[in-house]
């Protein structure tokens, strides 16, 4: 077995402490009632009740990706602002968000913004699956945003666990490091993971034991789009999209160095995590962004004992920069990621002591944006990305039992246009991509899955019609996908292993009606598709860490999904609510069915096959300001999945679940109580065990301090207060151990 990584401290922890110390020494802006620099929006943010300056408030310019954080005296600078009219969005937890209109002249503009205290904030702005940045209440599909202090409160070692409180989301795992998101009962290859709008480029969808190659610790925000969203992103988004936003390639030159540093400890796993990011100006035209995060964790403790071999260590380092000109910007970034973790033993066919996994990822991006190239187009954008990924599953004595390799190369072009005829705005785009898959292993039963290549070409158009109270969106996309195995075999044991080509059209239509008085209703219809992946087509052999023997089906066709969402939203200064009903019919739904047989090395045999499926359900959320700083938060979601040809339940569908929270929120501190609830899940597939319902209690408290002109946030939380023994229905570990027991977490974050 590998050494216990908890006995080593990550270098990112030391770097975090350096960032925190540096934040306290950075110069404050000088308060003035006049604009000090031309081409800027300058100003101050204050509390409305006391007129005291507010540090750590986020001020952003809607639609042009320029933002700043207020200093200790409440001042901020937004650079690179040409004359014209702009919309500013100002947010700080403990205060009600504000959106204001600003007209900027040749000399710039100075604004003073007052924020009123509130235990709930208005919905965030959203960029994912949108043509332009909009408020979540204006989105034509259900979206959720986690950012700022709320993101810090919910932060864990994985994206899926961090987002577990969002309606419609659940998590599946084979241990804490492998937690992966489930949206409306769909997971794996049907949930598209993005970093700053680009695909992550890992193999997390190829097995329950595979972690997602993204650490959320340094994320500025995470956006979730629920439901089919293939139009802008292509195939594989039947369930939804999760976009981890860091702004790796900066698009504006900051007036002062800005960023954040975090430090977290957790008792239930003995984990320590730290990291931070900083954006600074190398010159008047060159912004740079630097980031480092690290994490170590021991074995998870549960009420029934320790879940052995679940320790791990993670390190992520990134850097990006750009040249900012009057016409736009051009830039590049690079990122390195390493995650070594364990998969527990005790499964049928598994190693008694479990399996160790070593995964590495290197990614680079280039980006060029031209703003207002002519009267017809608002912007032209090109994004290019290259990713190298390797994933080793180690038996005892460091023998590689299973090996996954992946290289991806992609290019995206997007042209956003002004009003054309009846269309108030829209976009035309194209994508080309290449993926190279490699497989190997030297264990007792090596895999026979052939190395393969996948090529993709796509084009799409997306248009908006704004009729005042009514807004419509419509789009059309066509994709061609070609998959070629390195070894053809018409007489293979799994069928005719051959080149495959797939092509399909995606379309969407959405309608949003602003009824008035804070009420909005809407509906969307989407036709999306998913191409079978290489594992589903050509796999033939053991998957060591997943403890399965997988058999592909080279004759699988594309999944064709038709999804309908109907929703209603209400928002007022003291109350916000949204409820959505959805219906998703998928033709040719692909899944690995447990056959009930064991391979010659005693692994359960899973055969990939297809069947028509239906998933339907609802999700809802509300935030209610009860007065005097007290707020009620509630979310609930339910989905029912059925294989329609056999009328059998789809395996691993989450039960009816929800959360109920009560918070007392003041500008300088907060306390909260959170209750997780889930019902029994007895709609199970063959060889799947039902699980009981549960209720789990969590408590939290925190303080916000302005020290040295910087916002410092300290959060303490106690999860599973009663040390309840319960099991997540989507966990592969539930057969041998329950979920985490009582655990105390402490996090500290400084924003500068």
Image: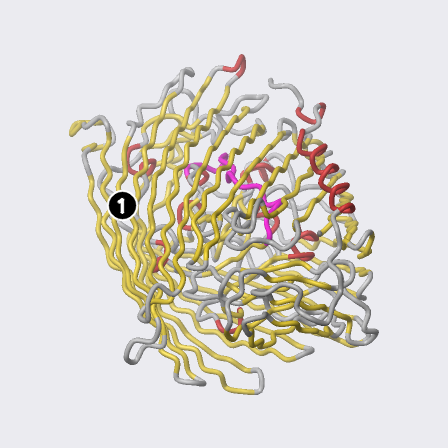
Label 1 Cα crowd, 10 Å radius (few <14 / some 14-19 / many 20+)? many
x, y percent for residue 252: 53, 55
Q: Can residue 618 be seen in the rendering of this structure?
A: no
Q: Quadrant of residue 42?
A: bottom right
- The residue that appears at 67% across and 79% down in the rendered structure is 573
Q: Quadrant of residue 429?
A: bottom left
Residue 218 lies within the magenta run: yes
Q: Quadrant of residue 702?
A: bottom right
Identify whether 466 is placed above or below 38. Answer: below
x, y percent for residue 628: 82, 75
Q: Which image quadrant: the N terminus? A: top right
Q: Main secondary structure of the magenta part?
A: loop
Residue 718 lies within the magenta run: no
Identify whether 694 is placed above or below 188. Answer: below
**Observer-nearest of 266 and 557:** 266
Residue ID for mark 1: 456
x, y percent for residue 545: 49, 28
Residues in magenta, as a range? 206-220
Side of 417 relative to 226 (left or right): left
């Amino acid at each position: 077995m590998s050494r216990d990584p908890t006995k080593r401290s990550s270098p990112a922890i030391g770097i975090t402490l350096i960032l925190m110390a540096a934040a306290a020494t950075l110069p404050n802006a000088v308060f003035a009632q006049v604009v000090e620099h031309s081409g800027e929006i300058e100003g101050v943010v204050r509390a409305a009740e006391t007129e005291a300056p507010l540090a750590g408030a986020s001020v952003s310019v809607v639609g042009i990706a320029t933002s700043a954080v207020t200093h200790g005296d409440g001042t901020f600078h937004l650079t690179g602002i040409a004359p014209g009219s702009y919309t500013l969005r100002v947010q700080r937890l403990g205060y009600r968000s504000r959106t204001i209109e600003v007209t900027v002249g040749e000399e710039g503009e100075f604004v003073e913004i007052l924020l009123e205290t509130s235990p709930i904030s208005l919905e965030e702005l959203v960029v994912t699956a949108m043509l332009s940045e909009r408020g979540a209440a204006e989105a034509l599909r259900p979206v959720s945003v986690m950012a700022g202090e709320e993101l810090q409160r919910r932060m864990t070692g994985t994206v899926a666990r961090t987002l577990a409180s969002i309606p419609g989301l659940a998590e599946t795992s084979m241990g804490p490091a492998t937690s992966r998101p489930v949206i409306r009962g769909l997971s794996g290859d049907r949930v598209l993971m993005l970093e700053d709008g680009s695909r992550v480029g890992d193999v997390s969808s190829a097995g329950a034991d595979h972690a997602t190659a993204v650490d959320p610790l340094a994320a500025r925000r995470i956006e979730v789009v629920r439901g089919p969203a293939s139009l802008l992103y292509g195939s594989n988004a039947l369930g939804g999209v999760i976009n981890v936003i860091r702004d790796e390639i900066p698009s504006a030159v900051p007036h002062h160095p800005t960023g954040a540093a975090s430090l977290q400890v957790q008792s239930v796993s003995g984990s320590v995590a730290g990291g931070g990011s900083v954006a600074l100006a190398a010159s008047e035209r060159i912004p740079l962004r630097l980031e480092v995060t690290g994490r170590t964790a021991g074995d998870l403790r549960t009420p029934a004992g320790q879940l052995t071999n679940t320790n791990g260590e993670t390190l992520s380092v990134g850097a990006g920069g750009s040249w900012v000109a009057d016409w736009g910007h051009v830039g590049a970034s690079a990122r390195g990621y390493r995650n070594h973790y364990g998969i527990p033993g005790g499964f049928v066919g598994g190693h008694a002591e479990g399996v160790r996994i070593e995964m590495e990822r290197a990614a680079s991006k280039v980006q060029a944006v031209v703003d207002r190239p002519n009267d017809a187009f608002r912007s032209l954008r090109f994004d290019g990305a290259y990713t190298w990924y390797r994933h080793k599953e180690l038996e005892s004595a460091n023998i590689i039992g299973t090996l996954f390799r992946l290289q991806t190369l992609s290019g995206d072009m997007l042209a956003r246009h002004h009003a054309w005829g009846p269309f108030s705005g829209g976009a035309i785009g194209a994508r080309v991509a290449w993926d190279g898959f490699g497989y190997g292993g030297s264990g007792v039963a090596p895999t026979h899955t052939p190395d393969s290549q996948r090529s993709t070409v796509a084009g799409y158009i997306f248009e908006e019609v704004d009729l005042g109270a009514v807004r419509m969106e419509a789009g059309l996309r066509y994709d061609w996908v070609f998959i070629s195995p390195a070894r053809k075999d018409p007489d293979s044991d799994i069928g005719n292993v051959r080149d495959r080509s797939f092509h399909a059209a995606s379309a969407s239509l959405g309608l949003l009606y602003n009824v008035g008085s804070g009420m909005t209703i809407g509906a969307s219809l989407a036709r999306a598709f998913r191409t079978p992946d290489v594992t589903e087509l050509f796999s033939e052999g053991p998957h060591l860490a997943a403890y399965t023997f997988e058999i592909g089906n080279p004759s699988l066709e594309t999944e064709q999904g038709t999804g309908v969402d109907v929703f209603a939203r209400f928002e007022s200064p003291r109350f916000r609510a949204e409820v959505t009903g959805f219906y998703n019919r998928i033709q040719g739904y692909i899944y690995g069915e447990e056959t009930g047989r064991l391979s010659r090395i005693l692994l359960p045999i899973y055969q990939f096959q297809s069947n028509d499926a239906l998933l339907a359900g609802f999700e809802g959320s509300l935030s209610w300001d009860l007065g005097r700083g007290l707020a009620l938060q509630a979310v609930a979601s339910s989905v029912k999945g059925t294989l329609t040809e056999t009328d059998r339940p789809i395996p691993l569908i989450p039960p009816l679940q929800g959360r109920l929270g009560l918070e007392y929120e003041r500008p300088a501190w907060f306390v909260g109580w959170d209750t997780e609830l889930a019902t029994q899940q007895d709609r199970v597939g063959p060889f799947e065990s039902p699980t009981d319902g549960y209720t789990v209690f969590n408590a939290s408290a925190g303080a916000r301090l302005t020290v040295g002109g910087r916002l410092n946030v300290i959060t303490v939380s106690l999860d599973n207060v009663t040390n309840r023994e319960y099991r997540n229905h989507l966990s592969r570990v539930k057969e041998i151990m329950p979920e985490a027991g009582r655990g105390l977490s402490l996090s500290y974050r400084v924003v500068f």
